[in-house]
Image (cartoon, helix red, strand yellow):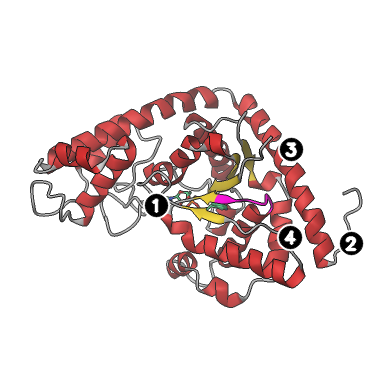
């Protein structure tokens, strides 16, 4: 049997999952699921890097796992795991952290953006070492490809550099993973609807620019209707403003249509029509996800069982990698490993 390449990716159970997460990551995961040996992770430890509410974190962790499945991740085909259920993630993060130069972490733009928004006394050092835990997630599974949105590119570069550094200093141990962005041709950077110069994000202050996957359809339509465009009235595909370009990109990603069809549908069309057609497509994609989500959340025992099976499958591989890491680093083998 030919081994399929390994895919690892994850999302944080903080805030509400949104259309950017769906188009930039979850849909590509689902559509390419049959090509790879997949690990899809709910990265709950990463959600501790910004202030959190414990009860909300518990609920959001199950909610995110259910949304993975509702969106089409098949637990029979892909391993679905919660990061903290596999303690090797945190263990490897410590080892890798000791090999990560501070300067590499200081250059991370996501850290710079997020820490700028809080006072230094109030941010935990986890926000700074966040990318090391992410590297541990990926490297534990000898991952070939990491499908993510554009905003994760720099973290992936750091992961690759860390793998190379470890292999160079301590001997060939980790596969150097490749980032996989935009494999569907569109959707890897969806912008906020009310501020198209910023990406659609879970940490957005106002939710007007963010289409949450659990928003009711009328809310989704209302948000698209209010989306920021410009002082013009009709679509000019040659030079769309950022707001119009973002709506076109969302349409392209949701419909999978090519440039010809886009031209035929929208060239010279009014902004009202553009917003309506994009809203139609978004609602058509999201409604079935919401229906499956309701079924799954009405049966939490089954969901917990799926997560327990996922953790057991993942631990087997992660533990194997850690035996090798311990040996390379010079730590005594764990008794019982
Ligand atoms: P997170 O939870 O912020 O986002 C999850 C995924 O959604 C993508 N994404 C977007 N894609 C397009 N347009 C947007 N506006 C948009 N916003 C988010 C992200 O690129 C990501 O793919 N650090 C990661 C989680 C993580 C991880 C990992 C990912 C932890 N360990 C290991 C891959 C491999 C994060 O915070 O994603």
Residue tagged 4 = 173
Q: Is residue 267 left or right of residue 255?
A: left
Residue 150: in magenta span? no
Residue drawn at 59 percent across, 47 percent down: 8
Residue tagged 2 = 332
Residue tagged 1 = 201
Secondary element at image label 3? helix
Residue drawn at 46 percent across, 45 percent down: 25
Q: Disc 2 to disc 1, how far (Cα)?
A: 43 Å
Secondary element at image label 4? loop
Q: Determine whether label 2 and label 1 are within 8 Å by CB.
A: no
Which quarter of the figure has residue 121?
Answer: bottom right
Note whether residue 219 is visible.
no
Characterize the local packing of mark 2: few (<14), some (14-19) or many (20 or more) Cα atoms within 10 angstroms.
few
Q: Disc 4 to disc 3, how far (Cα)?
A: 23 Å
Characterize the local packing of mark 1: few (<14), some (14-19) or many (20 or more) Cα atoms within 10 angstroms.
many
Residue 141: in magenta span? yes
Q: Nearer the viewer, mark 2 or mark 4?
A: 4
Q: Say which label, 4 or 3, has the lower sequence index.
A: 4
Q: Disc 4 to disc 1, how far (Cα)?
A: 35 Å
Q: Nearer the viewer, residue 79 or 120?
A: 79
Which quarter of the figure has residue 103?
Answer: bottom right
Q: Which residues are magenta?
A: 140-145
Residue 171 is situated, as x and y percent measured from the top left of the image, at 76, 67
Which quarter of the figure has residue 134?
Answer: bottom right
């Amino acid at each position: 049997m030919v081994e399929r390449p390994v895919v690892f990716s994850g999302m944080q159970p903080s805030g509400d999952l949104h259309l950017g997460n769906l188009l930039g990551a979850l849909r590509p995961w689902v559509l390419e699921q049959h090509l790879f040996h997949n690990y899809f992770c709910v990265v709950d430890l990463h959600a501790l890097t910004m202030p959190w509410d414990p009860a909300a974190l518990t609920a959001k962790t199950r909610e995110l796992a259910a949304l993975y499945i509702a969106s089409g991740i098949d637990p029979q085909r892909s391993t679905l795991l919660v990061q903290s259920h596999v303690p090797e993630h945190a263990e490897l993060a410590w080892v890798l952290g000791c090999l990560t130069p501070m300067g590499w972490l200081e250059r991370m733009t996501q850290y710079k953006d997020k820490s700028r928004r809080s006072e230094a006394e109030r941010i935990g050092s986890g926000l700074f070492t966040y990318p090391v835990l992410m590297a541990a997630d990926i490297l534990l599974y000898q991952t070939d490809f990491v499908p993510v949105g554009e905003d994760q590119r720099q973290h992936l570069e750091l992961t690759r550099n860390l793998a190379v550094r470890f292999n160079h200093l301590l001997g060939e141990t980790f596969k150097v993973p490749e980032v996989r962005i935009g494999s569907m041709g569109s959707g890897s950077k969806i912008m906020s609807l009310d501020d198209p110069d910023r990406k659609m994000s879970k940490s957005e202050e106002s939710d007007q620019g963010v289409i949450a996957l659990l928003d009711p359809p009328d809310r989704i339509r209302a948000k698209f209707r209010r989306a920021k465009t410009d002082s013009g009235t009709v679509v000019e595909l040659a030079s769309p403003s950022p707001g119009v370009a973002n709506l076109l990109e969302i349409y392209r990603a949701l419909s999978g249509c090519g440039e010809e069809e886009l031209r035929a549908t929208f060239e010279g069309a009014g902004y009202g029509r553009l917003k309506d057609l994009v809203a139609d497509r978004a609602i058509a994609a999201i409604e079935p996800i919401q229906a499956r989500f309701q079924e799954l959340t009405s049966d939490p025992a089954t969901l917990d069982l799926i997560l327990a099976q996922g953790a057991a499958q993942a631990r087997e591989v992660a533990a194997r990698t850690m035996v090798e890491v311990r040996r390379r680093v010079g730590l005594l083998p764990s008794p019982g490993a």
